[in-house]
Amino acid sequence: ARKYNVHMLFVLQNIEDIPYTIFKNINTRMFLFPPKQKEGIIHYIEEEIKASKEIIRAMNETKPFQFAIWYDKGIVHTSFEMSQQELNLFTTNPNATKEED
């Protein structure tokens, strides 16, 4: 499929939902860790996926609201700037103060 520029994208909420035989054949993996689940997800990647110590260290350095993009040369962290209006739109905290732009 690569020869014909065909790509496949998996979007999952639980890493455990993708079988290891498929996961190991994915070249680029993107993670957005929920703060309360980050440690468990990284532990799963370390134990079940057998990621290297460098990958685990880099994943642990991922800050809240950052993507960890794991590809064949390592991990890159990136985040997207969001306006206050966008932050208000995506907040799930009912106690958050909504500010106007």
Image (cartoon, grey):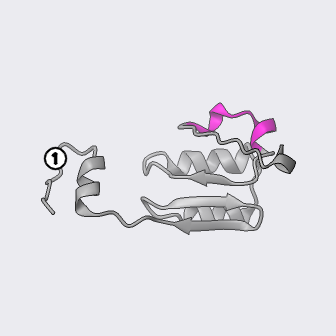
Vertical placement of residue 78 versus 21, above or below: below
Can you tell which quarter of the image residue 99 is in? bottom left
Percent position of residue 11, x then y: 58, 40
| Main SS category, magenta section | helix
Percent position of residue 65, x then y: 42, 59
User: Which amino acid type corresponds to the residue marked 1 in the rendered image?
Assistant: Asn
Q: Is residue 40 visible?
A: yes
Percent position of residue 90, x then y: 30, 48
Residue that lies at the very extreme toward the right in this rendered image:
3
Residue that lies at the very extreme toward the front in this rendered image:
4
Quarter of the figure that contains the C terminus? bottom left
Q: Is residue 61 visible?
A: no
Determine if the magenta segment contains residue 22.
yes
In front of the other: 57 or 78? 78
Residue range of the region highlighted in magenta in the rendering: 14-23
Secondary structure of the residue carrying tag 1 is: loop
Percent position of residue 85, x then y: 23, 57
Can you tell which quarter of the image residue 8 is in? top right
Determine if the magenta segment contains residue 92.
no
Quarter of the figure that contains the N terminus? top right
Q: Is residue 56 left or right of residue 96?
A: right
> Which residue does the numbered mark 1 point to in the structure image?
95
Q: Residue at x 70, y 51 (%)?
A: 46
Q: Residue at x 52, y 67 (%)?
A: 78
Q: Is residue 16 left or right of residue 66?
A: right
Q: Residue at x 74, y 42 (%)?
A: 23
In front of the other: 81 or 75? 81
Q: Is residue 97 left or right of residue 83?
A: left
